[in-house]
Image (spheres, helix red, strand yellow):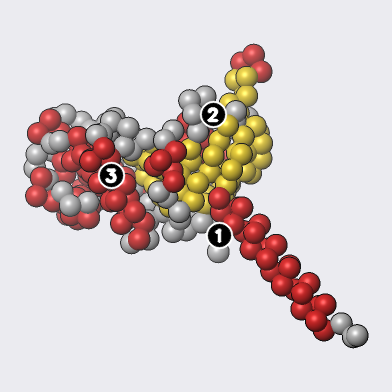
């Protein structure tokens, strides 16, 4: 099966030779829920921008659903983001003068969805996050947790292949933050592929897979470690069977 996203040998350098990313490789499969964790300056925000096709790396390749995005024009990248990617940000980025459903419907603008279909789809997305009863409310009439739910609905409304959530609990108290994580887990159970970018190790520990960045490099990937352990166990079993079958 083709990965949802594949980053191979990616580097990102800025003026003065500063490396934000150094030979980073990461694959995300359909249906995964993972955390990309690291302290400030580790390169996780740069990786987010590259995964989301918001920036182009200075080296390496990026593929979304098997398509090499490095060869696409800016207009083609914008269209790809509108179809394949959803974004959730720490500060919600909702438009004050629009109701919850109208904010969610903006997620359909670049997906080619006809105007008459936008409201029904926005209301359906709000229902998925438990906010359909607040669909007509303005952002300033919503709590912080409700605003983040609306932002998640906006990211989901066009049914993207991958949702990138950048510090989705960073502006929330503990109770609302936990509720948002529970919501993301439930959406993942329904089949949505989600990558959560965070500095919080406690949040990362709650998710099935953790990728840790430090100084622009991946230093830990729990899926890769589990796969390596599985291969070692399989090899050990094979060696044991060979010994048992060997003539005396």
Which residue is rendered at x = 58% and y = 32% of the image?
Answer: 214
Whether residue 107 appears in this view of the structure is yes
What residue sits right under mark 3 in the picture?
178
Residue 153, position as x, y percentages in the image: 25, 47
Residue 94 lies in what quarter of the image?
Answer: top left
Query: On the rendered structure, is 226 left or right of 156?
Result: right
Of the numbered discs 1 and 2, the one sitting upstream in the chain is 1
How packed is label 3: few (under 14 Cα within 10 Å), some, or many (20 or more)?
A: some
Q: Quadrant of the C terminus?
A: bottom right
Residue that badge 2 annotates: 42
Residue 227 in picture, x, y percent from top left? 62, 59
Q: Which mark is residue 2?
A: 1
Considering the image in quadrants, where does the N terminus appear?
bottom right
Q: Looking at the image, can residue 102 be seen?
A: no
182 shown above or below 150? below
Question: Label 2 neighbourhood size at 10 Å, few (<14), some (14-19), many (20+)?
Answer: many
Q: Residue at x 40, y 48 (%)?
A: 206
Q: In the image shown, does 11 or 108 lie closer to the viewer?
A: 11
Residue at the (31%, 37%) spot, across then down: 169
């Amino acid at each position: 099966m083709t990965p949802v996203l594949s980053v191979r040998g990616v580097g990102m350098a800025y003026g003065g030779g500063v490396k934000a990313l150094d030979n980073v490789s990461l694959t995300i499969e359909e249906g995964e829920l993972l955390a990309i964790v690291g302290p400030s300056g580790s390169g996780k925000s740069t990786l987010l921008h590259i995964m989301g096709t918001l920036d182009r790396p200075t080296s390496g390749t990026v593929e979304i659903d098997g398509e090499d995005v490095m060869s696409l024009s800016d207009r083609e990248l914008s269209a790809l983001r509108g179809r394949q990617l959803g974004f959730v940000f720490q500060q919600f980025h909702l438009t004050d003068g629009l109701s919850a459903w109208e904010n969610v419907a903006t997620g359909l603008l670049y997906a080619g969805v006809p105007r008459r279909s936008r409201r029904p789809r926005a209301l359906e997305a709000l229902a998925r996050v438990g906010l359909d009863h607040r669909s007509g409310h303005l952002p300033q009439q919503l709590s912080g947790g409700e605003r983040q739910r609306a932002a998640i609905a906006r990211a989901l409304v066009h049914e993207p292949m991958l949702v990138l959530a950048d510090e989705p609990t960073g502006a929330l108290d503990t109770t609302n933050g936990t509720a948002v994580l529970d919501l993301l887990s439930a959406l993942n159970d329904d089949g949505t592929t989600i990558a959560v970018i965070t500095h919080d190790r406690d949040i990362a520990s709650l998710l099935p897979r953790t990728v840790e960045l430090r100084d622009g490099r991946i230093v830990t990937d729990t899926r890769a470690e589990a796969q390596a352990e599985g291969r070692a166990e399989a090899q050990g079993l094979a060696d044991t069977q060979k010994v048992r079958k060997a003539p005396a």
